[in-house]
């Protein structure tokens, strides 16, 4: 069961000053979709995370657009935000933790156990490299915060691809023996996030 106190419906968004166009252009797809069994023949339900809605509402551009009742300003603000985030992603140095091979192996095996694997080598080539890259990627999750402020159609997918590419290139530079695994993840292999 979904905790409805953390979500807001389309009707709730309208009462907060959102137009249908603003919802479509800024928030995009709802976070939860389904059918409401209490209404007729399962009326559609679309719910948006309240935290996501409030983050957008805190922007100065949203306030002016909501008062004006239009989406052009929201779109322009989203595009400016997209360009700014992409520029930040391109300029931000990615600092990979430098560990000895033995320490990296220990941490990678421990990380693998924590996320549900056995941490033991099952004999497949590349297991340790996958675990090491997985550990290093998790150690660099703080860079994901650079994506804050991007929603739906405002370039989030493009920014995520750029960040992913920069992180895996940085890992490969710091640990040349992991280049193959980084390349595999960038090309869309299993665990490419």
Image (spheres, rainbow, N blue to C red):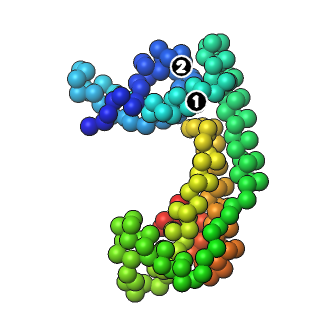
**Residue 58, horizontal then vertical, whole percent:** 60, 26
Q: Residue at x 56, y 57 (%)?
A: 141
**Residue 153, horizontal then vertical, whole percent:** 60, 37
Q: Residues within 10 Å of mark 1 (few under 14, many from 20)?
A: many
Left or right, 169 with reference to 41: right
Callout 2: helix, strand or loop? Answer: loop
Q: Earlier in the sequence, mark 2 or mark 1?
A: 2
Q: Residues within 10 Å of mark 2 (few under 14, many from 20)?
A: many
Q: Quadrant of residue 179?
A: bottom right
Q: Residue at x 60, y 42 (%)?
A: 148
Res 56 label: 1
What is the count of numbered marks? 2
Q: Residue at x 36, y 28 (%)?
A: 5
Q: Quadrant of the N terminus?
A: top left
Res 18 label: 2
* Marks 2 and 1 in Cβ contact (< 8 Å): no
Inter-mark Cα distance, 2 to 1: 11 Å
Whether residue 183 appears in this view of the structure is no
Callout 1: helix, strand or loop? Answer: helix
Residue that protrudes farthest toward the top in the picture: 68
Position of residue 121 relative to residue 150, above or below, is: below
**Residue 119, horizontal then vertical, whole percent:** 39, 77
From the viewer's side, name the closer residue of 15 and 40. Answer: 15
Position of residue 142 relative to residue 156, above or below, is: below
**Residue 93, horizontal then vertical, whole percent:** 73, 59
């Amino acid at each position: 069961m979904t905790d409805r106190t953390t979500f807001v419906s389309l009707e709730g968004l309208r009462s907060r000053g959102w137009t249908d166009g603003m919802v479509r252009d800024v928030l995009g797809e709802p976070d939860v979709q389904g059918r409401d069994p209490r209404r007729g023949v399962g009326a559609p339900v679309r719910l948006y995370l309240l935290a996501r809605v409030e983050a957008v509402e805190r922007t100065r551009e949203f306030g002016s657009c909501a008062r004006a009742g239009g989406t052009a300003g929201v779109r322009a603000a989203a595009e400016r935000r997209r360009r700014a985030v992409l520029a930040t992603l391109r300029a931000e140095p990615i600092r990979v933790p430098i560990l000895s091979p033995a320490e990296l192996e220990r941490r990678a095996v421990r990380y693998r156990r924590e996320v549900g694997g056995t941490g033991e080598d099952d004999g497949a080539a590349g297991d340790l490299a996958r675990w090491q890259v997985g550990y290093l990627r998790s150690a660099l999750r703080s860079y994901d915060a650079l994506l804050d402020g991007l929603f739906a159609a405002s370039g989030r997918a493009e920014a995520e691809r750029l960040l992913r590419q920069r992180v895996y290139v940085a890992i490969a530079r710091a640990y040349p023996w992991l280049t193959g695994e980084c390349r595999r993840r960038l090309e869309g292999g299993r665990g490419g996030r």
